Amino acid sequence: MSATTVPGPDGRPRCRWCAAAPEFLDYHDREWGFPVMDDIRLFEKLCLEGFQSGLSWRTILAKRENFRAAFAGFDFRKVARFDETDVTRLLADAGIVRHRGKIEAVINNAGRACELVETEGSLAAFVWRFELNDDGARPQSRSTSPASEALSKELRNRGWKFVGPTTVYAFMQAMGLVNDHAEGCIMRAEVEEARSALRRFS
């Protein structure tokens, strides 16, 4: 077992971070790193990564269903219509992270997502232009990348908020725009296979 992996319940190696909390194992094995092309899921993850800023992913993951209920399933077309009444409602919702700036950022970003879909065809078509293939960096050895910096800059230029390079890199790791599973992790090959089978946008 390498320093970057730990044995899972089945004895097979996985990324060390997934041993930090019981709920991380399922997330690691079923979600993290597998490529996502669905606009709603992509928008949700960008929002949740923004909420995580300054907090732990465990906190956000535990509240994920509450966030989905509070933000109309992260359907950005619906969220874009939220108003100050919704902000007040969300600030009173103990099931989510009650941070006015982050809540208002999600509503703002929903509007920007609608604009992006109008100009680019889909959120997926846009973000997958920034896919990071093997650039020689060791997995999980950094918190940003040139690709996350470029995507962050482009989003911010388009008016998005709470999308700094570190937040965007975490989004890219989770949504499969980079395979950052540790060398030796049993999921690394599965994720790479899923990424190889993916139909990219022309």
Image: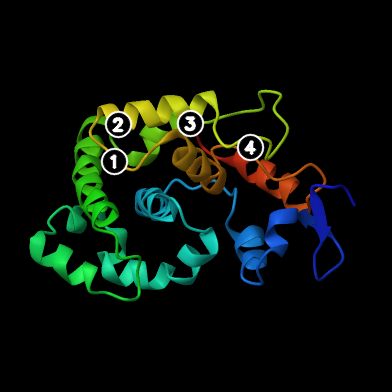
Q: Give the CA separation, mark 4 to mark 2.
A: 30 Å
Write down the quadrant of residue 177 in the picture. Answer: top right
- Is 169 displayed left or right of 68 in the figure? right
Q: Reply above or below: 59 against 134.
A: below
**Residue 148, disc:** 3
User: In the picture, which quadrant includes the C terminus?
Assistant: top left
Q: Secondary structure at mark 1?
A: loop
Closer to the camera in the image, 192 or 160: 160
Q: Secondary structure at mark 2?
A: helix
- Is 174 displayed left or right of 91 in the figure? right
- Is 86 displayed left or right of 152 in the figure? left
Q: Pick whichever of labels 4 and 2 is earlier in the sequence.
A: 2
Q: Give the CA separation, mark 3 to mark 4.
A: 21 Å
Q: Pick whichever of labels 2 and 1 is earlier in the sequence.
A: 2
**Residue 156, disc:** 2
What's the image's color scheme?
A: rainbow
Write down the quadrant of residue 140 in the picture. Answer: top right
Circles 2 and 1, Cβ within 8 Å, touching? The answer is: yes
Q: Give the CA separation, mark 1 to mark 3.
A: 15 Å
Q: Secondary structure at mark 4?
A: helix
Q: Give the CA separation, mark 2 to mark 1.
A: 6 Å
Residue that label 1 marks: 161
Q: Pick whichever of labels 3 and 2 is earlier in the sequence.
A: 3
Badge 3: residue crowd in 10 Å (few <14, some 14–19, many ≥20): many
Residue appearing at x 36%, y 48% in the figure: 39
Look at the image and tell me whether residue 202 can be seen. no
**Residue 182, disc:** none
Residue that label 4 marks: 196
Q: Pick whichever of labels 4 and 1 is earlier in the sequence.
A: 1
